[in-house]
Amino acid sequence: MIKIVSADFIKGAVKPEAYPSVNLPEFAFFGRSNAGKSSLINMIVNRKSLVKTGSRPGMTRQINFFTINKQFVLADLPGYGYAQRSAEENRAFDRMLTDYASLRQELKSIFFLMDMRRIPGEAESNTVEYFEKLGIEVIIVGTKADKIGKNDIVNVRKKWGEFFRRTPDLIIPTSASKNTGRDELLKRITERL
Ligand code: GDP
């Protein structure tokens, strides 16, 4: 298993011209705001606060890039689904996301995060379909698995598997609170390096 020895913030960027040119394989993390993305990233890199958690809705509107082990880049994409965003802000957000997904050559896979207590809907299926149509691999990650029981975890994986048209073993349950699922995520990254 890969050992995380360093995690360094490179920069934040909105427009493609501003993306860092590091030339390492890149993995992006994406999900609805409050899905637990910041907590999960901190768990992966073994840091308490590489990424700020519970930040004010709408605060992070840029893509934050980090180099991990000088081996790969982790891209922290802003969360979607803030009710407070204006139509204009939503357009800018969509633009940032579509630019990134369609132009970022280094991007290997997107880890798509969902709170395991949520039922995926149209927003989620559209998002996954959009990335996959661009030829980007989407890895589905269930967050806050500690909030549901063992049997529920099995059921959610089965239901999400059907919904996202993949086998249940491809739905990765995680909990940043209980520090579970980390090895599974690192395995997916390592396999793609
Ligand atoms: P983000 O908006 O997607 O970056 O989500 P955060 O990481 O900031 O987490 C949102 C909220 O969910 C915070 O109150 C976290 O403490 C909580 N949270 C995040 N991960 C977990 C988890 O694995 N288990 C539980 N029980 N709560 C979590």
Image (tube, rainbow, N blue to C red):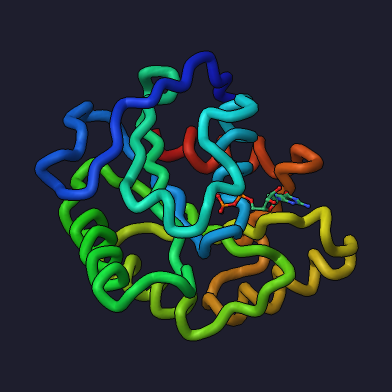
Based on the displayed image, in which of its 4 quarters is residue 10 positioned?
top left
Residue at horizontal 19%, vertical 39%? Answer: 19
Relative side of 140 to 102, left or right:
right
Residue closest to the far bottom: 122
Q: Quadrant of the C terminus?
A: top left
Q: Position of residue 152 (x, y in %)?
A: 84, 69
Relative side of 39 to 106, left or right:
right
Based on the displayed image, in which of its 4 quarters is residue 80 positioned?
bottom left
Residue closest to the far left: 17
Above-or-below relation of 129 to 63: below
Is residue 139 among what the camera can see?
A: no
Is residue 52 among what the camera can see?
A: yes
Above-or-below relation of 96 to 158: above
Q: Position of residue 75 (x, y in %)?
A: 37, 41
Q: Quadrant of the N terminus?
A: top right
Above-or-below relation of 123 to 89: below
Q: Position of residue 119 (x, y in %)?
A: 65, 79
Residue at horizontal 53%, vertical 76%? Answer: 164
Above-or-below relation of 40 to 123: above
Based on the displayed image, in which of its 4 quarters is residue 94 positioned?
bottom left
Residue closest to the far top: 5
Along the line of sight, which residue is nearer the eye, 193 or 11? 11
Relative side of 190 to 181, left or right:
left
Residue at horizontal 23%, vertical 54%? Answer: 100
Residue at horizontal 38%, vertical 26%? Answer: 9
Q: Position of residue 174 (x, y in %)?
A: 70, 50
| Number of marks present in the image shown | 0
